[in-house]
């Protein structure tokens, strides 16, 4: 579904991502791992067209995306949940969810889609009329993921979804990822919680200093403490 080949990205003169290549097959959960500063977030942002200077190839469903603007990538079925969540202040949970469809062709289905998504997220269902930014960090992360799901994307890119979230909500989140996969949604994760991520991942790629240095099945990397210590330990 997604093929990244020789992807390079820069912030000013800083060459952050260097010839990165990987693939994500339909229905998989794939994780990008590595220490802070390895280039994981920049890779996601480059896939979504949010980095100004980039080169290489990003093919999604057979279509080259690297020269396409971010809204076009969204309409092709890519959704992105950034680490900072970007819940809109002053809007309720329901209104933040509706933003997931506001630019799409399915605006007439908003009410039904909100109801369906709320069934998947019981915590949100109880808070549909509450201001989104008044919820806990974990609940806001659930809202950001739910908002991305509103347009029924083919693939969701998730940047550090468990960052700063209490353990009980982390458990709920990774259970949600397994359910999303079972329903056919493809996920590309950037995640520092190595053990939890590898337990749900089909495959993983490890980045170090802007390059892919190792790849393997999630279960194999979970069992390889030496690789984790070498590339992922803080």
Image: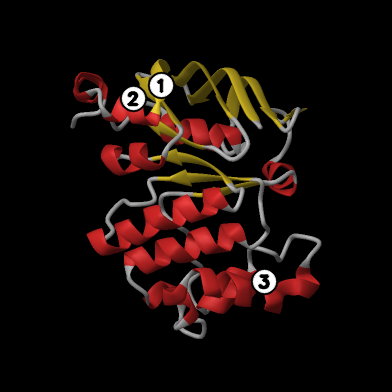
Q: Which mark is residue 182?
A: none
Cβ–Cβ under 8 Å for marks 2 and 3: no
At horizontal 41% and vertical 19% (from top left) the residue drawn is 215
At horizontal 58% and vertical 39% (from top left) the residue drawn is 50
Instruction: Tell me if residue 151 can be seen.
Output: yes
Q: Mark 1 points at which residue?
A: 216
Q: How far apart are marks 2 and 3 (CA)?
A: 38 Å
Q: Which mark is residue 220?
A: 2
Q: In terms of sequence position, does the residue under pointer 3 or pointer 1 come before the other?
A: 3
Q: Which colour scheme is used?
A: secondary structure
Looking at the rendered image, the quarter that the C terminus falls into is top left
Q: Residue 113 carries which label?
A: 3
Nearest to the eye among marks 1 and 2: give it.
Answer: 2
- Residue 198 location in percent, x, y? 35, 36
- Residue 199 location in percent, x, y? 34, 40
Nearest to the eye among marks 2 and 3: give it.
Answer: 2
Q: Out of 76 and 154, give the one closest to the viewer.
A: 154
Nearest to the eye among marks 3 and 1: give it.
Answer: 1
- Left or right of 147? Residue 104 is right
Above or below, 209 against 65 in this view is above
- Residue 99 location in percent, x, y? 63, 67
Q: How far apart are marks 1 and 2 (CA)?
A: 7 Å
At horizontal 74% and vertical 48% (from top left) the residue drawn is 75
Cβ–Cβ under 8 Å for marks 1 and 2: yes
């Amino acid at each position: 579904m997604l093929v990244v080949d020789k992807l390079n990205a820069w912030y000013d003169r800083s060459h952050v991502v260097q010839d990165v290549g990987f693939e994500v097959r339909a229905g998989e959960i794939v994780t990008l791992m590595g220490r802070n500063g390895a280039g994981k977030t920049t890779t996601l942002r480059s896939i979504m067209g949010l980095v100004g200077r980039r080169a290489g190839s990003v093919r999604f469903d057979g279509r080259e995306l690297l020269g396409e603007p971010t809204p076009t990538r969204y309409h092709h079925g890519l959704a992105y949940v950034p680490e900072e969540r970007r819940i809109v202040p002053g809007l309720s949970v329901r209104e933040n969810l509706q933003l997931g469809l506001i630019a799409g062709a399915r605006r007439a289905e908003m009410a039904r889609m909100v109801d369906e998504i709320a069934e998947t997220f019981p915590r949100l269902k109880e808070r549909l009329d509450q201001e989104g930014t008044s919820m806990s960090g974990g609940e806001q992360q659930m809202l950001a993921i739910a908002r991305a799901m509103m347009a029924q994307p083919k693939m969701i890119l998730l940047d550090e979804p468990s960052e700063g979230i209490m353990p009980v909500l982390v458990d709920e989140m990774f259970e949600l990822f397994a359910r999303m996969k079972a329903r056919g949604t493809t996920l590309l994760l950037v995640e520092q919680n190595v053990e939890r991520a590898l337990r749900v991942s089909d495959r993983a790629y490890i980045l170090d200093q802007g390059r892919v240095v190792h790849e393997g099945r999630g279960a194999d990397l979970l069992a390889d403490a030496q690789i984790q210590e070498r590339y992922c330990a803080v």
